[in-house]
Image (cartoon, rainbow, N blue to C red):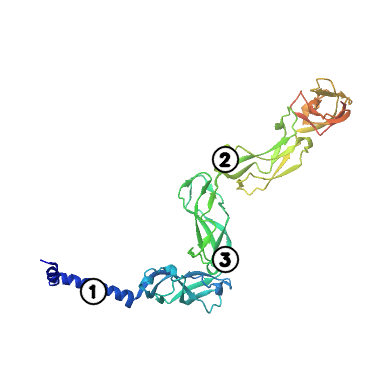
Amino acid sequence: MNSNSKLSSLWENERFLAVLSLFIAVIMWGYVVVFVNNEHTTTIHDVPINLQYRSSAYQSMGLDVIESDITTVDVSVTGPRSVTGDLTADDIIIYPNITGIDGAGTYTFQLTSDKTSNISNFTINSFSSNSVTVRLDKLISREFPVEVDISSVVVADDYMADRPTTNPSTITISGPEYKVSTISRVVAATVSTETLSQTSVLASRIHLFDENDAAIDTKLLTMNVSEVDITIPIMKEVTLPVKVEYVNVPAGFDTSLLKQTLSAGSLRLSVPAQNASALTDMVVGYIDLATLETGKPYTFELKLPTGYRSLDEVTQITATVSGDNLTERTMTVSEIKILNDANGEIRLLTNHINNVTVVGEKSAVDSLSGGSVIAQIDASRLSAAQGQQSVEVDFIIPSTDKAYVKGVYTVNIRK
């Protein structure tokens, strides 16, 4: 069979003719689409609404967009298929037509659009929503003191919780003025339910309340801290004997001889639980024996360590030393000793000290002689200056612990 007869038989083949017809139809459709009917309409989804575009209309009034009912729209566009097929949300800007603003409030603005790229041969037909509703208000910041709610905490038996503190003690809240201005109280509430027997630091949640104690939603509000630490001092009640002690007590003198009367013999205190077991008494002040006046009231302000609190509301303690069992006697002391002068550098220029006042139990004081009271100079404590000096002396009474020398006395020496 020659080639002509083969071609003739091919044209007579119905299957071949059907395939050829389909091929030609596709070619013709493609031509029409590309060169004859090129217009194409499509939808670009989720195009953002630019609420800051041309925002000077409200920002000049100190306002900002606080919230809006929608943030994106779907946009219908028409253009050549070669163009619409490549369009994205970046090629279009949707923004509100801002008009009629007279202050803070809620406004509905019509939406409009612009093309943002070099592609321009397409048409923006419509949006899925023609308007946007926005809230305009001033953004402000305000500082609030933090209140504390420790109602979830359980305190162990025989202990008590003292006034809690927070760190930080204030927080700054920022947001729209209409919402910040409704805040009346800021409360840090503990979330722990553990039983406490010592001072503890617990995390908390922040809650906001209005003037009617209704909770305020924190949406649209920001805080400079997300939580605060609550320190809960766990205290224990103790009763401690009060003591007033003495200073400038001569060596060997028995201070129990001094009969002391106190305005309060003991104090009920609230103290940190961890310190309670180590406490035995409360020293509230000191009396100087060198200037002691019997029968005179000495008043001391009650100054408690940090974290301690008086449960009796006592603020002062008065101490009086009775003179009923004491007597005073003026003597001349002729025994003056120099200590720690190995090289003999010091020469005593005073032979005796007149009018030395001795205080003590009557029988002990009456039994003293001029030699029973000894004045001492410690050479190791003297200045390095050369020549004649006036120096203070210490006294000892070796024969008894029931008497001491009252006052300050000096002698002259040469070095």
Closest to the observer, 405 or 86: 86
Mark 1 touches mark 3? (CB < 8 Å): no
Most extreme residue toward the left, as rendered? 1
Q: Position of residue 217 (x, y in %)?
A: 48, 64
Q: Residues within 10 Å of mark 1 (few under 14, many from 20)?
A: few
Find residue 142 and report its image quarter.
bottom right
Left or right: 262, with 353 as reference point: left
Q: Which of the numbered marks, if any, corresponds to residue 175?
A: none
- Of circles 1 and 3, the one toward us is 1
Residue at screen point 53% across, 51% down: 229
Residue at screen point 73% across, 40% down: 320
Left or right: 255, with 407 as reference point: left
Q: Quadrant of the image for the C terminus?
A: top right
Left or right: 263, with 147 as reference point: right
Q: Secondary structure at mark 1?
A: helix
Residue at screen point 54% across, 72% down: 55
* Residue 40 visible in the snapshot: yes
Q: Secondary structure at mark 3?
A: strand
* Residue 71 visible in the snapshot: no
> Up-down: is 390 above or below 128?
above
Closest to the observer, 148 or 299: 148
Which residue matches tag 2? 275
If you read the primary sequence from the N terminus, does the residue marked by circle 1 or circle 2 appear first?
1
Q: Amino acid at mark 1?
A: Ala
Which residue matches tag 1? 25
Q: Which of the numbered marks, if any, corresponds to residue 140?
A: 3
Q: Position of residue 137 (x, y in %)?
A: 54, 71
